[in-house]
Amino acid sequence: MKIKLIYPKWPKLKRQTEFHLPPHGPVCFAAAIPDNVEISFYDENIQDIDFNEEADLVAISTMLTCQIPRAWEIADQYRSKGIPVIFGGIAAMLHYEETLQHADSVFLGEAEGRFDTVINDFKSKKLKKIYNYFHDFPDMRLVGPARRNILKRDLYNYRGVQMVDLVHASRGCRFNCFPCCTPFLGGRKFRPRDIDSVVRELESIDNNRLFFVDNSMAQDNEWEKKLFKALIPLKKKWISHPIKDDDEILDLAAKAGCWYVYQAVFDTSDYIRRRIQRLKERGIGVEGTIILGMDNHDEDYIKRLVDFLLEVKLDLAEFTILTPFPHTPIRATLENEKRILHNDWIRYTGGEVVFQPAKMSPDKLQEMYYYAWDTFYSDCSQEIKMAKLFLKVIEKEKADGTYEGTRLRRERWNSRKK
């Protein structure tokens, strides 16, 4: 049996430098497929799909709302050929009712320990319309290494620089942030993987630079300390979402190879200023994630916010516009207030205004979004700021003797391209 696994393309943020990371969802899903099933994988962001390639079943993995319209187009094309299609992933869960119109089957939930049932049903010609494991989470001991050998690794680089590999040490999130759908998808319970299992997976990845895509590392202090202590001997360099603002944890993160973190900047307070400063004091870079269009934002506020970002010397900034994705607290609020302008999902990129702001017009918020990008990067382009961050990781690698291995791997990847 052969499954064709597809990761559809989506419109990228305007103003942001375009680069492509190896996707995480598809390689985790592929690890849940029995070994005797052949898989071919296409990431449409970096390669064209071969619609003539033979397959028994097409599996479409979706992460983003703005990705789902293209996913439906792909599914319709395959189904017109008589090839059945199954959907899975975050966006399929957020839009499963609409997706059912374009699918033979939709898988809701996490696939570990469950996908054998789907394969057996398919072989018996009894494929179900819905496999609903929503909030019926698998035992975390079933979550093993992702199946990265399906990736065409040579294609994931930016100007000759190999991109980070994505990995996760936990699932779920005990927080309930207003713009986030994670509580709906993964539950409010923090579900850590066994740390030894995580370490074995990291050791197996032929890349010194990693990205922990956990929703937040700062969910359990003792677990976070144990994880970082376990990472120290590996000498990997990594990026993550927020880590706990605690002296011991920050020191351990630096020793464990923390390269930079994504830090939400939601105001201009001394709390945010100190948090950024404490990371930078330990040699940890900071990429600010800034949502524009909150109810207290007007034109002057956004200008002051951008000035603050420049003042605290963020290494990078990623600006997005508040976007009411399905099953988020903010969407419920804006729906009740009748402030959502449309549900044209392909425009739900985080870079377009799709709701009525409280203190300005949609056009003005769109204008201020471009102002934020252009002003923050006016003296130094995003490409150069990214390069500076890469120089920092090279310095870290040279300090602990791992740079030569990274360089040789890069040369090997580049030679394969030729």
Image (cartoon, rainbow, N blue to C red):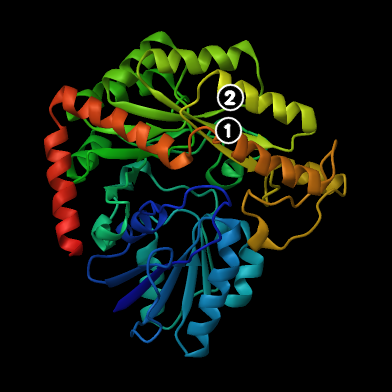
Task: Assess disc 1: are there few (<14), some (14-19) or many (≥20) residues with their C-alpha within 10 Å of its C-alpha.
Answer: many
Left or right: where does residue 130 sit relative to residue 210? right
The crowding category of the residue bearing disc 2, from other C-alpha atoms within 10 Å (few below 14, some 14 to 19, many at least 20), is many
Identify the secondary structure beneath mark 2: helix
Q: Which residue is drawn at 58% across and 52% down?
A: 14
The location of residue 331, given as percent across then percent down, is: 74, 46
**Residue 237 as seen in the image, left or right of residue 279:** left
Inspect the image, locate mark 1, and give the three-letter code of the amino acid beneath it.
Phe
User: Residue type at mark 2?
Assistant: Leu
Mark 2 and mark 1: span between their CA atoms?
8 Å
Marking on residue 309: 2
Q: Where is residue 5 in the image (x, y as percent from the top left)?
A: 38, 69
Furthest residue toward right: 337
Question: Residue furthest toward the front?
Answer: 379
Identified at 52% across, 47% down, the residue is 16
Return the residue at label 1: 376
- Residue 103 visible, this angle: no
**Is 343 located above or below residue 271 in the figure?**
below
